Amino acid sequence: MTPRPASILMMIVGLMMVVVTFWGTAHYIFPFYPHTYPFAWYGLVLFLDGLLWWRWNEGLILKRPREFAVLLFWSAVFWFFFELWNLVLQDWYFVGVPPEGLWPHIEAYLDFATVLPGMFLVYRLLCHLKIPVRVKTEFSLKDWTQKAFLGIGILMLILPLVFPDYFFPFVWGAFAFLLEPLCARFGARSLLMDGKNGEWTTLVRLLLAGIICGGYWELCNFWSLEKWVYTVPFFSEGKLFEMPYLGFLGFPPFCVQCFVMTNALYLLRGGRHWDPRAPRPCFLNRGPDRREAARTIHRAAYALIIVLGLFLSEWSYAKMKIHTVDSHSESLKQILQDISPYDAGKLTREGWRYPEQVLNEWEKARETIGMSFRKRIRQRLELVSLLNMGAANARLLESAGINSREKLGGQKAEVLFPELTRLNQSLRLRNKPLLKRRVVAWINAARRRSAFY
């Protein structure tokens, strides 16, 4: 095999993107610190695609750019769809988001577009590495399983809507059960058909790809200014990075679900698939006239789904801005304007840009700040940088007499939440209702001392 210069270049550039991103994040360098996730993930996608092309003559970005673009598009649409679910579940929210405008709108699509390519490239790497070699058992699924899957899928969709606090995990597997019978019936790639033959290798590799990608997602998220924070019920006190320990169990079925959803869409694309080894849909085996009629129907249905997907994505983004985004990135002047704008300006001119950066270099930064303001500025920056809650939330806590992480860590949400709600009604520091789960997240974060707890 002759190495392809383009694939080697992709690997080098991708790996450099990942390394530079984490280095830049560690040193609070723009744009890497505020936008760790997209740089780290597109770097990984570029590296994996180059590796697959170089080693196994398989790739998407340059070899099959159309399929890569399709994956990017549907990846964003899928995740915007799950953001709509989160309006009911309230299991996560976003902080440190850029101020409103065109760029955060575009960045949301760019961020969400990495989900499918990232997972599927890791899955294909596991396939080529034969990890695991093969998983085949005597046990196989029976014919009645298809109907059972439909019933289970419908139930898994309904229960999180009715009882979100108890059945929220079902969201990450519902569509796998709901759409697998459709894939099996019409000849798409089907895990259900594999299961009927006692073949579980693809399923296990997808589960592994999910947990690998989940770990990388959380690694990228934890260190970034712009990030998501989980507020799932019952499991909020023990976390690795920002994810509750048990929450990592959701990544494997999520990967399987995305695989199934993509395979179902493939039926409407006339047999075009990101994986060239995917089987032909049943309608392509019909006679010429019936095949062409089926193609026409499928094209119309696919075009309709694209329009619907774009509409849902834009609707989801509008709802996210209102309900899911809790804070925006702010300058030091905005954060400290009610304490000492003069000192904030001095810090900025000396090269400090972010609260966490100032705190990390406090011994040097404090010499720039007037003595009478040092304590208040440090306390404000400590609160603001806690889960990147922002200045409005920090001021709200201060109005309740909580001006340090230590005081916040000693609070009980049952007492603090109603007090903050009452204060916000009079002070109007937040332009959105405060949620108890987010107050719980603040308190737990104030007690936290590392990425593991």
Image (cartoon, grey):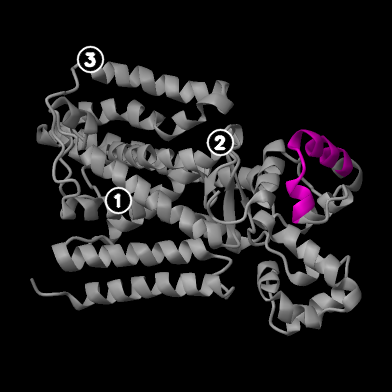
Q: Name the residue that disc number 1 marks.
A: 120
Q: Could you tell me how far apart the alpha carbons at marks 2 and 3 are, in whole angstroms?
A: 36 Å
Q: Which mark is drawn over residue 144?
A: 3
- Magenta residues span 405-423
Q: Is residue 418 magenta?
A: yes
- What residue lies at 57% left-to-right and 43% top-to-bottom? 316
Q: Give coordinates of residue 133: x percent, y percent.
A: 14, 46
Q: Residue furthest top?
A: 144
Q: Earlier in the sequence, mark 1 or mark 3?
A: 1
- Is residue 224 positioned above or below 325 on the image? below
Dominant SS of magenta comes to helix
**Dot 2 and dot 3 residues touching (CB under 8 Å):** no
Q: Residues within 10 Å of mark 3 (few under 14, many from 20)?
A: few
Q: Quadrant of residue 104?
A: bottom right
Residue 184 vs 229, above or below: the answer is: above
Q: Which mark is residue 133?
A: none
* Horizontal side, residue 155 vs residue 389: left or right: left
Give the amino acid type for the residue marked by disc 3 in the picture. Trp
Check if residue 11 falls in the magenta segment: no
Q: Which of labels 1 and 2 is toward the front?
A: 2
Residue closest to the eye, 42 or 29: 29
Amino acid carrying label 1: it is Phe
